[in-house]
Image: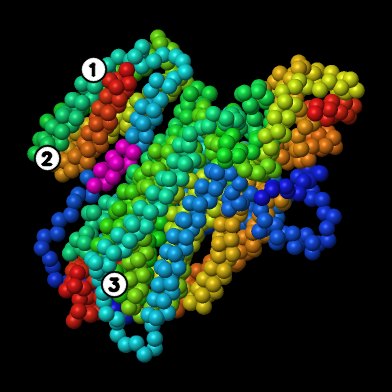
Amino acid sequence: MSAHTAVLKQSTDEWKLPDKGKVGMICLIVAEAAIFIIFVLAYIFYLGKSLSGPTPAEVLQLPILGTVCLLSSSITIHFAVTSLERNAARLSTFWLALTVLLGGIFLADTAREWHELIYEHGLTIRTNLFGTTFYSLVGLHASHVVVGLCLLTLALLFGVAGKLNSSHAHRLGVLSYYWHFVDAVWVVVFLVVYVLGR
Amino acid sequence: MDGMGNMKDMPAGHVMNHESWWHHAIHWVTDAFTSPTSIFSPQATPAHTVFGLSMLVLAITLAIFLTVSGLLLYAIIRFRHRASDRGEPTQVYGSKQIEVLWTVIPILILVVLFLSTIRVISVTEMAKKPANALDVVVIGHQYWWEYRYPASGVVTANELHIPTSDPKAPTPTYMTMSSADVDHSFWVPNLAGKMDLIPNKVNVMWMDPRNSGLYLGQCAQYCGMEHAKMLIRVYVDTPTDFAKWIEHQKTAAAEDPQTAEGRVAFEHTACVNCHTVRGTAAQGKFGPDLTHLASRDTLASGVIKNNPQNLRQWLDDPDSIKRGSLMPKMNLSSKELDAITAYLASLR
Amino acid sequence: MIPSPTAADLPLDAPPPYPKKLWLDAVNEWFTTVDHKRIGMLYIGYALFFLVIAGLEAAIMRIQLAVPNNHFVSPAVFNRMFTMHGTTMVFFVGMPILFGFGNYLVPLMIGARDMAFPRLNAFSFWISAFGGLLLYFSFVGGDGLYGAGTAPDVGWFAYAPLTAKLFSPGHSTDYWILGVFLSGIGSVGTALNIVTTIVCMRCKGMTMGKMPLLPWLYLVTSAMVFIAVGPLTAAQMMLGIDRFLGAHFFDVQAGGSAVLWMHFFWIFGHPEVYILVLPAFAFANEIIPVFSRKPIFGYSAMVGATVLIGFISLGVWAHHMFTVGLGPAGNSFFTLATMIISVPTGIKIFNWLATLWGGRIRFATPMIFSLAFLFQFLIAGLTGIMLSAAPFDWQLGNSYFVVAHFHFVLVGAILYMIFAAFYYWYPKMFGRMLSETLGKWHFWLFTIGFHLTFDFMHIPGILGMPRRIYTYEADRGWGMWNMIESIGMIFQAAAILIFVWNLIRSYRQGKEAGPDPWDAWTLEWSTASPPPHYNFAEEPVVHSRRPMWDLKHPEAPDSNYE
């Protein structure tokens, strides 16, 4: 066989394969989910096993505001993507801004909660098993929110500068997959830590 | 099989060599076939049951090996390319029937293996504890073994004494095990499979040796610098001898007026912070109990023979014998060393 | 000065003349490349370097253990040697070399021009490489080289609470955490690339059922990476939080659990060994058919068995923990799961046997390594079945029997197929054949050494020798066996030297290979050796699993029979 010879020239019917960006992001989500599951398992395993210190029931309150905001931000980013697909860039920018705002409120609520836990209840990561597993799990999630917010803010800045159009809808869609994942993790964390664990 | 091994009079690394070199070489070969720690020389029920299972497993895997490797060898020879071959051989893509065949047969073999294994698991792990069982608490430390006998209050270290068990009226030893620091594992192959000693967790295992003698083993879970030197010596005594041993160990420490100077020196040094000598001011719990130190054959968990020279060297510089041992160098003067050695050597 | 030739001076199909490269340009090219073939070679070269280093670490251990109560190295150094040997071999030899071959071959075999995310590909390599350098920096960081510095000494599985700050002061454990953590990020990145490339970039006509087995196995391997590496990363984060922020994940004094680390580690650790072995199977699936002159027997069964192995391997981890006190239910469950995984694994061996059957076997170097692989993997699998019976494991576990078993898998199976892959694909990568004579010397010396060391190693395990001991008593009867094992090491070292020499020498002096030296059937053999930067001049179109067979045998193409 000589070099550069193509194999079998007859063309076949339309050859459509899944989208790279979405497949890649799903892979990343699976890998990240594996990490989160282990932290959740550790949290559940150590429930009730702390030798001392504050218990979840004593110090935890349902983070309603933060949760509502974060879960709503999944809806707003969905609208950001669909409106960008229709080339409604200014509308999309508006929805993006709302998403960033809602995510920011979630983070602020978390910060307020942690401040109260540390300074009023004396619960830190080294206080007991509850402190260790709580701050690690919620902190790991919060760090993923921070990364998502950075990326969303970047997209927002492009939108504000008028540079977005429908050709970017695909990438925004991939980013929205990440953001939905972050929200889904929060649902699990919320149920395990604030509902089941208390 | 008795597990008496060669004992060394000097610290690790120096072998007493009275033999000529070719005697040594012959021993080197014969030793390789007469190990005191073989899993195939069971001397107690747990080791026996595992031995039975292992023979079954070995037989099945040997049969599989001979069959498959035989076929492989045949294929390689019969179907090798020959100079007279022209073109490609018949292209065969697969066969559903054959796939089913060599899926079903292995599954059947596995069912047999699995059921045999379950039986052994239940015989060992779910055995009913007889009323006459001896209880021993084993606590693993870096790098020594603590043994406590709750029924009699005896506490000792590194050399475990247990009675033989008569199958007609069993008196097995049940060991409740945990660790004071990191993970360890108790393994005396002639008597039973190994069981880990894990901090914050309690494990239970049992042994019922038929014959008296000395059985050897060692720690089987990496636990730090001197993991290799955390040796196990199990002295299986006849019931009478065992009763005598327990009675003796229950007594408080010997008080020999000739070694009073050493005793005073011992009580005034930091030794008492780590070691217990029952009946004296020494009540430390961190290191081995020394009440009847002189009744033991070895020091430092089986590493060196227990005699005054070795004892003195150990006190002088533990690192020279077992580097990484948690016993610090006490910087004793030569006079203090002599006195304390004499005192400890009197603690029969 | 002689003017450089212009395009007009050269024959029509010659590559265009380039100005002579400065060596700096060449280095810059390699540092900034995003070409999957170059990245693949970077991974492979990196892994070969660490193979030699980890081999030296093994040599030091074998010298220390050759006689009882030896003083060749101190306990501290020995403990660092076995830790570094294991950690290096798994994370900085095994993973990179298998991802290296995957990087090189997957796009070529599916008719694509590169990986889905070339820059992520480069990033994944460099971050893993950095992880390795960080791990080895531990030898000289801190206390310097004396006593092997602050290299980790906690074993490659770093059990808690030995790794707590209390029992491992200093930074040795931290180097272990960071070095391996970074390599994990690289692994996930490469796996992501492999999956996306296979799912989204196959050439026209290549449905999943027409894809060669190598990409199939890499697909399953990469999916396992996503699920398995996460637990290790999480556990390492937890250990890092314990050591640096005073947390209590594995702090037994605060109620933490040592067994929890074991669970998390082995939830990673067991799938990890399948992640290492599946690519070796992938090579066998390509090489054995070509040198038997028959297609792989039972393609669908092979795919099915691989997927099944992938799934079941996620559920067997606690067979590494039979002595921990899981209780009869736990021990029984994991015995059953482990025994079950032997069924799809056996199916693979039988399918390879059936591929050989009725063939016309040629004994070129790639094939003799593959044949040895078949025998050795069979033995490894059978000793694995012995260990799967929990009570038998209560005696054999944590002994040299286990060390022998897993070296049969890692060396006897995986390394042998890596050698086969080198001999098979080196011509494609460099356009030259490796020397068959040197290859046969390499094979026979290595095989003699391998069997001297690892066959006999089963015996001390049966005679009660635990692992990770820097020396042993003279009265246990282990001396003769250890001496034999240490002698075997010398043969293996010599063979590796011959192998490296073969690689270097053949680069300039090897016989020219041409695009298809082995008369093979998959797409990588349809382009030049080495392939041009863009792989294929036109996107290939395929109709069966062996497109080149169809071209060479138009009277009986595979598409008629599949």
Q: Check if mark 2's residue and mark 1's residue have beta carbons within 8 Å.
A: no
Image position, residue C310 (x, y; %):
33, 51
- Against C49, residue A61 (above or below) is above
Image position, residue B188 (x, y; %):
61, 43
Q: How many marks?
A: 3
- For this orientation, the residue located farthest to the bottom is B84
Residue range in magenta is A23-34
Mark 1 lies on a secondary structure that is helix
C466, C85: nearer the viewer: C466
Residue C13, image quadrant: bottom left
Q: Which residue is mark 1?
A: A65
Determine the chain carrying the residue at label 2.
Answer: A
Mark 3 lies on a secondary structure that is loop
Image position, residue C205 (x, y; %):
17, 64
- For this orientation, the residue located farthest to the top is A120
Q: Is residue C47 visible?
A: no
What residue is rendered at 35% in x and 80% in y? Answer: C360
Circles 2 and 1 on the same subunit: yes
**Which residue type does callout 3 highlight?**
Pro
Label 3 crowd (10 A; few <14 / some 14-19 / many >=20): many
Residue C295 numbered tag: 3
C237, A195: nearer the viewer: A195
Label 1 crowd (10 A; few <14 / some 14-19 / many >=20): few
**Which residue type does callout 1 highlight?**
Leu
Of badges 2 and 1, the one in the foreground is: 1
Left or right: B41, with B83 as reference point = right
Mark 2 lies on a secondary structure that is helix
**Which residue type does callout 2 highlight?**
Glu
Residue C458 numbered tag: none
